[in-house]
Image (cartoon, rainbow, N blue to C red):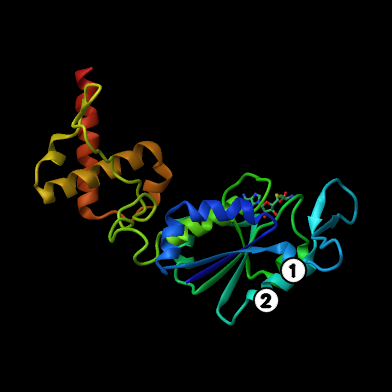
């Protein structure tokens, strides 16, 4: 897979890639990530990439021609061109999984007050937002998408480590522990120290259900629950009842 990030600030983007798992994946040839300087596609003596907004209002807007030139230089028949945009489709684990199935992503980072509307309509295939808040540029959003997508590609992480994670199964992940077995009086649950894999799997599923119920009831309401899940949830309710009675 190849991911191109088109930005006015390559120096912001490249170090993150170079020093993260993304850099390792790139060196190992698992994903080809390139940072493309938008200014290289601007013309004229001053290589201008932004201009005043028609209709007034403060702030600059990215011009369409340099972005069109950059995308057209990079694009192939199988490319998917995504404009980072707070007005786009909200990014999620499901969207990351969908994008991980593509062969070439071109992520365009906006800046200033935004990007000329014709880029959105004529150049980009779609718009993606990383959440309902506004940042100063599309660099962090492009890196968020790149990171979430790349870690799903085969070989980037140790095998199996993305399968049970938060948001992949529709539930939040179970609690994880490492050494020491006791920290500030809090001991690691006994069951995790034994080698009973079936019991551990059951415990993990139950704790994932408990966390999701407590912290993200909206996710639990949408989750596809098995008969075992319902049994585990009933056990959790029962334990809660016993705890309340004891208090
Ligand atoms: N005036 C615009 C915001 C511009 S922010 C508006 O109100 O919609 C400048 C650039 O940062 C945007 O063009 C976009 O590329 C990027 N950006 C900011 N917040 C973002 C978000 N939540 N998701 C994706 N991109 C974002």
Q: Which residue is mark 1?
A: 41
Residue that sits furthest to the bottom in the current view: 77
Left or right, residue 33 beside residue 48: left
Position in image of residue 138 (x %, y %):
64, 53
Observer-nearest residue: 56 or 147? Answer: 147
Observer-nearest residue: 7 or 126? Answer: 7
Can see residue 87? no
Left or right, residue 71 beside residue 193: right
Q: Is residue 57 above or below residue 127?
A: above
Residue that sits furthest to the right in the current view: 55
Position in image of residue 79 (x %, y %):
57, 75
Q: Which residue is mark 2?
A: 73
- Labelled pair 2, 1 in contact (Cβ < 8 Å): yes
Q: Residue at x 17, y 34 (%)?
A: 189
Point out the tag, 2 or 1, that comes first from the N-terminus.
1
Q: Residue at x 78, y 66 (%)?
A: 42
| Residue at disc 2, CB closer than 8 Å to ligand 1 | no
Position in image of residue 219 (x %, y %):
40, 47
Please identify the quarter of the rendering in which residue 82 is found.
bottom right
């Amino acid at each position: 897979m190849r991911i191109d990030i088109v930005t006015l600030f390559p120096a912001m983007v490249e170090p993150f890639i170079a020093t993260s798992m993304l850099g390792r994946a790139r060196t190992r040839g698992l994903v080809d990530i390139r940072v493309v300087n938008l200014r290289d596609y601007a013309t004229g003596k001053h290589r201008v990439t932004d201009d005043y907004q028609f209709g007034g209002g403060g702030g600059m807007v990215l011009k369409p021609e340099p972005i069109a030139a950059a995308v057209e230089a990079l694009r192939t028949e199988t490319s998917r061109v995504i404009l980072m945009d707070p007005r786009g489709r909200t990014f999620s684990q499901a969207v990351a999984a969908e994008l991980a199935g593509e062969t070439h992503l071109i992520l365009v980072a906006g800046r200033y007050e935004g990007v000329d509307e014709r880029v959105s309509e004529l150049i980009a295939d779609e718009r993606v937002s990383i959440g309902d808040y506004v940042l100063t540029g599309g660099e962090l959003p492009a890196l968020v998408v790149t990171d979430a997508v790349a870690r799903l590609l085969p070989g980037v992480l140790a095998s199996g480590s993305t399968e049970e994670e938060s948001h992949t199964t529709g539930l939040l992940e179970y609690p994880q522990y490492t050494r020491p077995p006791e920290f500030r009086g809090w001991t690691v649950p006994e069951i995790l120290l034994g080698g009973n894999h079936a019991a551990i799997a059951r415990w993990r599923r139950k704790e994932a259900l408990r966390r999701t119920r407590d912290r993200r009831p909206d996710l639990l309401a949408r989750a596809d629950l098995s008969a075992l899940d319902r049994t585990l949830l009933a056990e959790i309710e029962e334990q809660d009842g016993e705890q309340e009675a004891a208090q």
